Amino acid sequence: MKVAAYQAPVLRGGSMEALELIRSRVEWCESWGVDILCCPEAILGGLADDIADPAGIAISAENGRLGALLAPLESRSVTTIVGFTEINAAGKLYNAAAVFHRGAIIGLYRKCFPAIRESVYSAGDQSPVFTVGALTFGIMICNDTNHRELAETMVARGATVLFVPSNNGLPPDRADVSAWTRAIDIAHAKENRVMIVRADVAGLTANRISFGSSAIVDAHGTVLQAGELFSEGILVAEVAVESSSARR
């Protein structure tokens, strides 16, 4: 199977412009035989922590709105992982990622560790794995990768790839985190013998910069692909599908 990470441009807060950008990447993936495309954290609407009205960008996964919004990404061959701000029936906000497969949402992951500092997001409390074709995978969102137990739990449940939607748009004085995130990805890959696929944003706004830390690291810790600094792009790698028991 082929997997891909989309290093998307930094967009203004509240923007849904990313839908058209992702649609074009899905079409590209269809042409190049990519099976799963991972997009950045909060690619739809931006991070709620950076927006004056967080509920204004939130999308319910329970009333059909999310499925309708993602409908343009429908593909017979490409499954897309899309980051967004979720709101549940009780009004809680979650930093979430949807797994969109053949026109349907087949699963959601909620970020378990919303931020190093304060956040308007509630913490997720599940570590699900998902299966598409012969591939079982997990999702960790950005800061989640600083917590080893999440990766270990997902791998124990059969994940052979961990997708990492990220959004490292930060104030200029602490924006250069590429080396740090790369070291984390390599460590997770080696410790768990899984491929790590990280998709970040890249570029700048009036008060945020993201260098772009997107990368694909194989199960031996070798960096197969890395995003260009400050540049939009897509990274692709082949992943050998094998059972978790075969890795032990």
Image: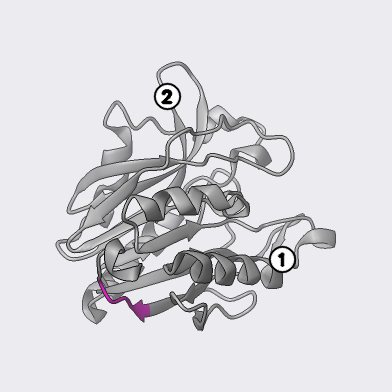
- Tag count in the figure? 2
Q: Secondary structure at mark 1?
A: loop
Along the viewing direction, whichever of 107 and 205 lies nearer the viewer: 107
Q: Amino acid at mark 1?
A: Val
Q: Is residue 111 visible?
A: yes
Find residue 218 and report its image quarter: bottom left
Q: Which residue is mark 2?
A: 88
User: Where does the magenta region start and end?
Assistant: 237-241
Toward the front, the furthest residue is 248
How crowded is the residue under tag 1: few (<14 C-alpha within 10 Å), some, or many (20+)? Answer: some
Along the viewing direction, whichever of 247 and 215 lies nearer the viewer: 247
Circle number at residue 177: 1
**Magenta-colored segment: predominant secondary structure:** loop
Q: Secondary structure at mark 2?
A: loop
How crowded is the residue under tag 2: few (<14 C-alpha within 10 Å), some, or many (20+)? Answer: some
Percent position of residue 147, x then y: 60, 49
Distance of label 1 from label 2 (alpha carbons): 32 Å
Percent position of residue 229, x then y: 64, 78
Q: Is residue 25 magenta?
A: no
The N terminus appears in which quarter of the rendering?
bottom left
Pick whichever of labels 1 and 2 is earlier in the sequence: 2
Along the viewing direction, whichever of 212 and 215 lies nearer the viewer: 215
Residue ID at (25%, 65%): 243
Please say which color scheme the image uses: one colour
Left-right relation of 139 to 65: right
In the displayed structure, 198 sits above or below 69; it is below
Toward the left, the furthest residue is 76
